Image (cartoon, helix red, strand yellow):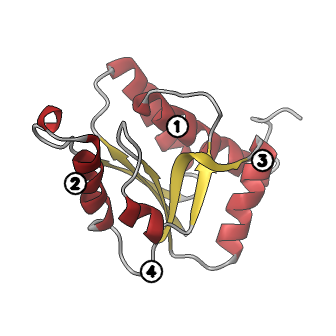
Amino acid sequence: MKITLLAIGKTDDKNLQVLIDNYMKRLKHYVSFSLEVIPDIKNSKHLSEAQQKELEGQEILKRLSNSDTLVLLDENGKMFDSVGFSGYLQKKMNSGLKNLVFVIGGPYGFSKAVYEKAQGKVSLSQMTFSHQMVRLFFVEQLYRGFTILRNEPYHHR
């Protein structure tokens, strides 16, 4: 199985990017993982919230293939503890998926078309985080999930 994280807009904090890169490098020992950054919509300050979500949604959807399983990182998604998330990953791997695609949306969330295409939603917290921080939290939890599945000492129970 391959895991892809799609995210709107680049990370402009170099320190944060170093941490994200560190966890991405660690993940290579467990799974094929990639982070694909969708450029920010140009002139977005002249667009309504709905227009921005629609344009971002088009960019997200054109990066998917028919065989991809789309999971949104969404505040209304299912919440897991780390052990539960590792179990979620194991179930996805056992189901024979080729590509599991997680998406971090833009500042206003997702378009209706993206919600309709999604096969699941996961919430990282009830708190609100910057989209840049969510990337770090997600790749760390992904790494933690795989170490749990392998009974490695990263996660303390």
Q: Are marks 4 and 3 in contact (CB under 8 Å)?
A: no
For mark 1, what is the residue?
23
Report the residue marked by disc 2. 55
Inspect the image, locate mark 1, and give the three-letter code of the amino acid beneath it.
Answer: Tyr
Q: Nearer the viewer, residue 154 or 78?
A: 78
Neighbour tally class for label 2: few under 14, some 14-19, many 20 plus, Cα within 10 Å: some
Q: Amino acid at mark 2?
A: Leu
Element type at mark 4: loop
Residue 88 lies, with reference to residue 94, above or below; the image says above
Q: Is residue 49 left or right of residue 123?
A: left
- Residue at position x 80%, y 47% in the image: 83
At 56% from the left and 34% from the top, the residue drawn is 137
Comparing labels 4 and 3, the label whose residue is closer to the camera: 4
Total number of numbered labels?
4
Instruction: Give the mark nearest the N terminus, 2 or 4.
Output: 2
Q: Residue at x 41, y 30 (%)?
A: 132
Rounded to the nearest whole Å, what is the CA distance between mark 2 and mark 3? 38 Å
Classify 10 Å Cα crowding around label 4: few (below 14), some (14-19), many (20 and above).
few
Q: Element under label 1?
A: helix
